[in-house]
Amino acid sequence: MAGSGRPVGLVLLALGPVLAAAYAGAGHLAIRTAVRAQTAGPAWEGGRIDESGLTSLGVDTWRLTWWTAMVVGAVAVAYLAFGVLLLRERRGRTLILVVSGVLIVPYALGFGVALFNPVELLAGLYDSPDFLAGLPAWQPYTAWLLLAGGLAQAVGMVVAAAHGRRAAPKPPDVAEVNGQS
């Protein structure tokens, strides 16, 4: 059981980017569903639809969802890299831990934006009840994917830091350095 920390830590660290991608994918699916409802609804006046099949509202909500996922995903990849570095027996652990502590701010902001649900807010701003009605019931809960990824990565960082600390060489005893037994 001594070596089990390394794979567990890496799996937990890898969950961050995976769940950020899952957030983007689920958001895209929800937006496509809402756009279909918007264009089929009675309030649709035949507005502009781009080459990807999204309305102006769909494009704006997708961009906001995509950027949120990209920011959180980039931070998640940084955490994955930091976790791998913590597993090694090198110096600089303190700097890695400090920088990873600072990176929690954009991670938390990304989760906050997702939790605030800009898709519903933009649909209200655009005054598109058909788009709102077409959003799947699960769409507001996709924000929790980002939180789950962040929590998994936090645990993964702890596991990586603990495993790396055990693997690091211990400093020699003062008596050994002075030649005394």
Image (cartoon, rainbow, N blue to C red):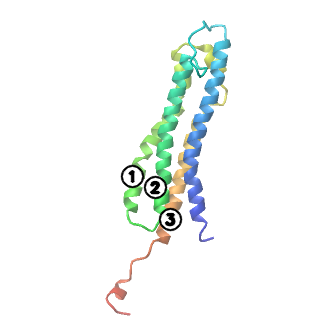
> Mark 2 and mark 1 in contact (Cβ < 8 Å)?
yes
Please identify, in this view, whether the residue under mark 1 or under mark 2 is nearer the observer: 2
Name which residue lies at 49% across and 48% down: 77
Report the residue marked by disc 1: 99
The answer to whether residue 11 is above or below residue 71 is: below
The quadrant of the rendering that contains the C terminus is: bottom left
**Callout 1 amino acid:** Val
Pick whichever, 140 or 38, lies toward us: 38
- SS at circle 1: helix
> Label 3 is placed on what type of residue?
Ala
Q: Answer with left or right where residue 171 lies relative to residue 133.
A: left
Q: Residue furthest front?
A: 51
Question: Residue 162 got which mark?
Answer: 3
**At 61% across and 35% down in the image, what residue appears?**
25
- In front here: 168 or 32? 32
Q: Which residue is mark 2?
A: 82
